[in-house]
Amino acid sequence: MDRFDAMQAFVRVVEAGSFTKAADTLHMSKTTVTQLVQQLEARLRVKLLNRTTRKVNVTADGAAYYDRAVRLLTDMDDAETSLSSAAVTPRGRLRVDVPSPFARMILVPALPAFHARYPDIQFDMGVSDRVVDLIGDNVDCVVRGGEMRDQSLVARHVGDLRICLYAAPDYLTREGVPSRPQELEDSHHRIVGFLRTRTGKVPAYAMRRGEESLTVQGRYVIALDDGNAYLAAGLAGLGVLWLPDYMAKPHLARGELVPVLQDWQVDPMPMYIAHPPNRHVSAKLRVFMDWVIELMQEHAPVIRPPVKR
């Protein structure tokens, strides 16, 4: 039995809550992970996990051993990354999750420069707008827009997205140009809805013009939970969109979108990069987070103070 592999397998089972998910994130078979944990229990002569057909629970002894194992694995990682070669050239695999439009339009196009700087870092990148279980899915960090609701995460406010309203020329020709936000709710006008995966609902937007303020929900023909599909629906003329500048810019230049209700303002959307509180910030994770901050400074720098948490 490799004690390091067994310890790592046990930690992942505890964090993932199942042998199957732990095996997936470790790129091992479920049988291998099960055998490693069983061998570890035999060596320690204690029961670390209670297994049922539906879930896995850690025992009292297992919880105590988990805390020590996490510290030991972190110390081992520190020892490796403190070596001069590892410190100068961070290496290894990073598991990150980012919004789909951000990946397509900002992150992935800039990756060749990052790879040239850090050729030994390998990415497993989830590209989605879903809520990710960082610990259960063994994700090192996420980039997310909107206020951070999960107070357990270590989050850094890295930028703000300026939000404006847009519509396709075909939509405006067919339905006319809205002159006030209320028309998105009480007339023939429609929005494209963006579904929040946590709630399954389309959010309302707070809008301001001087001293006047209101909240607009809007009525929609279609609501989607993916940013790229949301944009595609707007380009197809299915309704008015709330879009960050970086998503709208290339389509404005090509005449595929037109700004509407320009005298009304929408609060900017904060962008965060976050990681689990018990996740060691390795050299590879640190340089990736620093690089994301550089990108945000170029495309959407912080324009308002971070929300107190």
Image (spheres, rainbow, N blue to C red):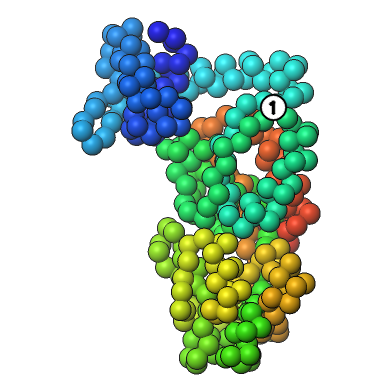
Residue at image point 49% right, 86% down: 185
At mark 1, the secondary structure is loop
Q: Residues within 10 Å of mark 1 (few under 14, many from 20)?
A: some
Task: Spot the residue most to the left.
Answer: 53
User: Residue 290, image x and y in percent?
Assistant: 72, 40
Residue at image point 70% right, 80% down: 258
Residue at image point 42% right, 38% down: 136
User: Residue 84, image x and y in percent?
Assistant: 75, 16
Q: Is 182 drawn above or below residue 2 in the view shown?
A: below
| Residue 51 can be seen, yes or no | yes
Q: Is 53 drawn above or below residue 271 in the view shown?
A: above
User: Residue 53, image x and y in percent?
Assistant: 21, 33
Quarter of the image that includes the N terminus: top left
Which of 150 and 25 lies nearest the eye of the viewer?
25
Residue identified by numbered label 1: 120
Give the quarter of the image for residue 25.
top left
The amino acid sitting under disc 1 is: Asp
Give the quarter of the image for residue 87.
top right
Residue at image point 73% right, 30% down: 119
| Residue 37 can be seen, yes or no | no
Q: How many marks?
A: 1
Q: Is 232 drawn above or below residue 145 in the view shown?
A: below
Which of 154 and 132 lies nearest the eye of the viewer?
132
User: Residue 212, image x and y in percent?
Assistant: 62, 86
In the shown orientation, is residue 14 left or right of residue 237? Answer: left
